[in-house]
Image: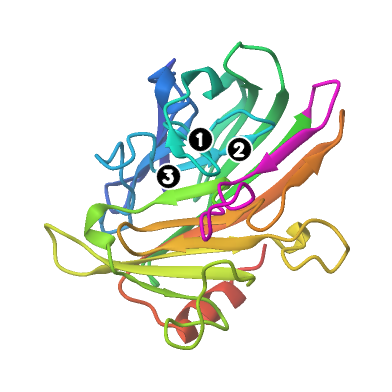
């Protein structure tokens, strides 16, 4: 067996690669501080060689935790954590707006060969604890490629509105702050990754600004502290996500920063709100590839082309 799974019930699930002895990630689902909008997250996430590619509770944003699904503005509530952005007033401490995402149960937890699966049910709540949404989540490790020094996980979430009224997904940008369209799947890179290289199939720093743009994938290259070398993390939309809106559905745009910290989100609501009617389900899937080394655009494109969804 290539992958090994360890479940510390009520706390976390850890997936390790037996051949390299590396813990690839821990999926932590125990509740944490209310101010930080409790929700499950992945941390630490590591390359096959053991390089760390996530951060946890950095001093600038204690609610940034590895790789997690967030909702920074949701019908007046904040399931992102910390202060809430209010147009004209900035970020304010409004604990009565900070909600949570709660683990309900795992439907499947297994590891076989080079695949591992975590299928989970969650509920979404505003500050008062009312049920606003139910989520079916599936995190799956796939495409462990020791020759390329890379492995991938897919993250699929289906969020169903259980309110009697609309759920409105927004962001600080939809509420008036430029270039702050974060919401949805969110990655916080380690402090060492500040000033890393960011590129998409079309944009590469000087060519164009990836922030707020649309592209099927985005890569972030950072250099480690403590050990020599770099890592490349690639975020990719599933083809069914309709990232460019060809089918007339809500398009996604990339939120990305390399300064003052490393962060990426394929935002659900960068320029405009996403509105989910009562009973409707929002389904999105992403693939995250974690690779040792500083990959360039051509190597990323070739690797993705060789690993079909």
State left or right for residue 90 relative to residue 195.
right
Q: Is residue 11 above or below residue 68?
A: above
Residue 309: image location, x then y, percent: 67, 62
How would you classify the magenta stretch by its main secondary structure? Answer: loop
Q: Residue at x 41, y 64 (%)?
A: 150
Q: Are marks 3 and 1 in contact (CB under 8 Å)?
A: no
Start and end of the magenta stretch? 161-181
Task: Give me the C-alpha separation between circle 1 and circle 2.
Answer: 8 Å
Judging depth in this view, the residue of 145 and 104 nearest the camera is 104
Q: Sort mark 2 into few (<14), some (14-19) or many (20+) by Cα contacts within 10 Å.
A: many
Q: Are marks 1 and 2 in contact (CB under 8 Å)?
A: yes
Secondary structure state at the residue bearing disc 2: strand
Q: Sort mark 3 into few (<14), some (14-19) or many (20+) by Cα contacts within 10 Å.
A: many
Q: Which residue is mark 1?
A: 80
- Mark 3 and mark 1 lie on one chain; the one further toward the N terminus is 3
Residue 152: image location, x then y, percent: 49, 57
Judging depth in this view, the residue of 277 and 47 nearest the camera is 277
Q: Which residue is mark 3?
A: 3
Q: Which residue is mark 2?
A: 73
Secondary structure state at the residue bearing disc 3: strand
Q: Sort mark 1 into few (<14), some (14-19) or many (20+) by Cα contacts within 10 Å.
A: many
State left or right for residue 228 relative to residue 254.
left
């Amino acid at each position: 067996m290539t992958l090994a799974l360890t479940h510390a019930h009520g706390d976390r699930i850890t997936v390790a690669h037996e051949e390299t002895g590396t813990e690839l990630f821990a999926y932590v689902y125990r509740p944490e501080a209310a101010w930080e909008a409790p929700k499950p997250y992945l941390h630490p996430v590591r390359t096959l060689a053991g390089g760390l590619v996530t951060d946890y509770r950095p001093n600038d944003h204690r609610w940034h935790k590895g790789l997690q699904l967030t909702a920074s503005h949701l019908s007046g509530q904040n399931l992102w954590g910390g202060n809430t952005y209010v147009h004209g007033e900035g970020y304010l401490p409004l604990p009565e707006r900070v909600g949570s995402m709660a683990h309900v149960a795992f439907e499947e937890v297994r590891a076989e060969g080079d695949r591992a699966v975590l299928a989970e049910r969650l509920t979404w709540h505003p500050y008062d604890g009312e049920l606003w949404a139910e989520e079916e989540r599936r995190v799956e490790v796939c495409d462990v490629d020791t020759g390329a020094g890379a492995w991938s996980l897919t993250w699929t979430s289906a969020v169903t509105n259980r309110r009697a009224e609309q759920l409105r997904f927004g962001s600080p940008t939809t509420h008036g702050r430029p270039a702050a369209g974060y919401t949805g799947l969110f990655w916080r890179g380690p402090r060492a990754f500040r000033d890393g290289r960011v590129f998409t199939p079309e944009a590469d720093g000087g060519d164009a600004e990836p922030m707020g743009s649309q592209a099927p994938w985005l890569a972030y290259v950072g250099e480690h502290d403590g050990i020599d070398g770099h890592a490349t993390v690639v975020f990719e939309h599933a083809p069914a996500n309709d990232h460019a809106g060809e089918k007339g559905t809500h398009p996604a745009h990339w939120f990305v920063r390399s300064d003052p910290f490393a962060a990426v989100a394929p935002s659900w609501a960068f320029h405009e709100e996403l509105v989910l009617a009562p009973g409707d389900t929002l389904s999105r899937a992403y693939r995250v590839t974690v690779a040792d080394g500083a990959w360039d655009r051509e190597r990323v494109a070739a690797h993705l082309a060789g690993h079909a969804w």
